Image: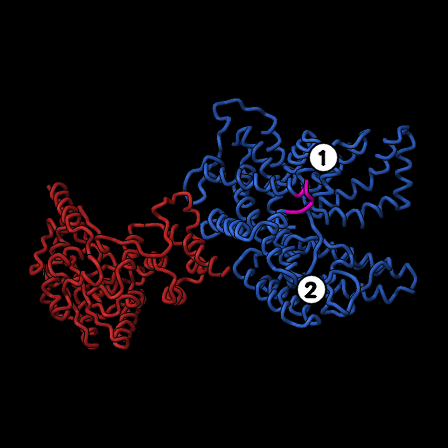
Chain colours: A red, B blue
Amino acid sequence: MLCAGLWLGYRTLAYTLRPDDEGVRTRLEGFYAEAPGSLDAVFIGSSAVYAYISPPRLYLDTGIRSYLYATPNQSVEMIRYAIRECRRTQPDALYVIELRAMLSSAQDREAIAADMRRMTDNMPYTLNRMQMIHDLAPEKDRFSWYFDLVKYHERWKEAHMEDVRWTWGQRNEWKGWSFSQCTQQIELRDYGRINARIQPDEENEGDFRQLLAYCKEQNVSAVFLATPFPVSRRQVKIYNAVGDMAAESGYPFWNLCREFSRIGLDGDTDFADEHHVNTQGALKTTRYLEERFPELLPAGKAGNIQEQYGPFLLSEEDYLEAERKSLEELQKNGS
Amino acid sequence: MKFISPGSALLSAVTVLLVRLVPKHFQYLFLLGASLAVLAWDRTSLGVLCLTSAGAYAGMVLLERMRKEKNRCRKAVLAGLLIWQVLLFVRFQGRCLGISYVTLCLIGWELDVFRGQGEAEKNILHFAADVLYYPRLYSGPIVCGDEIRVKTEGKRETGLRIQAFGSAAGPLRRILWGLFKKMVLADRLAMFVDAVFEAPASCAFLILWLAVIMASIQIYADFSGCMDMVLGLSQLLGMSLPENFSQPFFAAGFADYWRRWHMTMGRWFRTYLFYPLGMNGKVIRLSNALVSNLKSRRQKKCARMLIPLFATWAVTGLWHGLSLHYLIWGLMCAFLILVESGRKKKPVRNAGNILFTFLIMSVVRVMFRASCVRQALSVYSGMIRFRASAGMLRSGAGTGIIGGAGILPGGLDCLDAVVVFAAVLILWIADFYRERKGCGIGEWVARLPMLLRWMLVFLAAAAILLTGVYGPGYAPAEFFYGRF
């Protein structure tokens, strides 16, 4: 009883004091508030996911319930643990796995290592979390990875009552999506005719093959995705090779970098920066995916199951109002 | 391996379990194993302590065998042994874990064996377990002579006893209390005090005085916190070690202070240096020459004390560190005791004398706390020059703990000040209770209803987890007395 009490006390303190750096805590924590088995789709990836897809819009248009389990600079090797984590409560969902990390170099990965903590520091204390830390975390200070309170205990000075958590899972109404009101003009080039292939970075390739093997072994219902941004020729060729690898394992690869015109993206109005779309661009991307989902989600699954799991959105009006305001702000910033 | 670390906690937990489970005759082996595991993290410490222990073992066995030999031969062996110990101490002080404490303990044991007041340990594994007992390596306590020995029931009659194991709750509460003092108070104060002592010239008058007072509290919280953890752990292992503190901040007078502060050190130096010097023929003759012109009895008494007192305190200072400022500190302490001895009456135990003793000892401690004489003089200079400027409360170099700016040097902010105030208050209340009732806060907690007891324990644990100074981004202070 003593040990259980101490553990519960420690866990409460740790959950309470975790920071919300760039909204990662709010995003990841919200996933655990979704009822087990209630989601039709889970999106895994980096900012190439949470800047691009609006689950509330997807739900309002199609009834598909989804969530964005995404963290900044999420690497390919981290994806397997993210899937495992999500499948604890959503084993039957379709996993939409964004693969922009396949374009990273060794130098990028050094920076990505620092971002790995944002994921582990926002997961509940599970065996999967321990395994991820054991496999991927650097040796130095690893104790503070396992017991993140060691790193964040000083935040007691900034904590508020609403931060208190007895368990991990505070509802997120936007389901992980980040609105963006910025606009940057960029040049979109159509490299749709490029069919050549370049193998991705060796480490990325190895991690991806491991990921594919894991998905096959665990019978994960998955589709791989590349969200649209102004790619270079080289990056197009890498994506081509990635698509081949996915196809070898029987998984589809939706390369939206070849679909600018079909999506309707405009380089003058729809991008926040060179790597991410803004709210307008995200809504266009989401509507495009709505057309593609019926390929993978069986008819009837994408339906309203509110009676069983409760409402997906507590207030549709609130979401619509937020969406409207974001678009208005965008127009002001753009003009 | 640091004493407060996940590795050390795990090792200690495993050692306690094993020692409690195995037959009594083999307990010392597991203690030895744990001690070697700790020392293995630092090969220098392992090598040096093994060297000094090996020399002591061989020397003591030889001394005991030579009991019937001529005194001159035995003195030569003892002299060689002492020189060996002192040389290793001088060479490796500050670089070897526990060398200061082990050296004193071994010298005391050797002297006892020489005088026939103690026995040498013939079993080398027993001997190693006694000497290298790892909790004692960090900050003591300094055990006298035969006390160093770990006793397993039925084999040896003297020394420390591995007792029948009672409740673990009391020792665990003591460890928790030690952690609170160390991590919440001492390490937090260390950031402030270190920052002030590093740049005393840029600190204002009040800040300097505050730092001097806080330095006293910091060292006490650090050292006594360590002692609580060491004694608590030893109790878990079934061993009883001597106490090192007896509410020193309630001392009325300097002699009283040193009977309450680092008591085992005081006891050792009295037993093996002060009294032998005081009874030494040559010293007596020299002292008599000094007192021959004095008329007052008090003056004669002080004069007779002069040589043993100053010699003892000079060695005490140098034991802490082979630096001039430690030597000066020792001589300052000796001077205060001498002056007090020369007074007509002993200081009366009242609030005024207690406060006076505390303040004077805090001022003297500046010489001890500083890294060199120049730094100490810089602090003293700032303490006597009243800078009545707009910057009276200027903090000086206020770099944040984790990047933010603080209100005090070292980056302490308002909430840190609240934590310090609360912790100091709790510490004072605990010491006051012990001074009045003769029993510690642990005994008081043990008498509470179970629900209240557990609430206090959880609160203490939460306070340590939240407000303790530890984790990435900090450089938590090593035990202050661990450097000796």
Q: Is residue B91 above or below residue A325?
A: below
Q: Quadrant of the N terminus of chain B?
A: bottom right
Q: In x, y percent, where is residue B328?
A: 70, 38
User: Mark 1 belongs to which subunit?
Assistant: B
Q: Quadrant of residue A36?
A: bottom left
**Residue carrying label 1:** B252
**Residue carrying label 2:** B164
- Which of the two discs, 1 and 2, labels the residue nearer the N terminus? 2
Q: Nearer the viewer, residue B300 or A309?
A: A309
The CA span between labels 1 and 2 is 38 Å
Residue B11 within the magenta-colored segment of the rendering? no
Q: Quadrant of residue A239?
A: bottom left
Q: Nearer the viewer, residue A91 or B273?
A: A91
Q: In x, y percent, where is residue B250?
A: 68, 37
Q: What are the residue bounds of the magenta stretch?
A: B434-440
Contact flag, marks 1 and 2 (Cβ < 8 Å): no
Left/right of residue B2 with respect to residue B248 in the rendered view:
left
What amino acid type should be assigned to the residue bearing mark 1? Answer: Ala
Q: Residue at x 65, y 66 (%)?
A: B31
Circles 1 and 2 on the same chain: yes
Left/right of residue A267 with respect to residue A177 in the rendered view:
left
Q: Residues within 10 Å of mark 2 (few under 14, many from 20)?
A: few
Q: In x, y percent, where is residue B364?
A: 67, 36
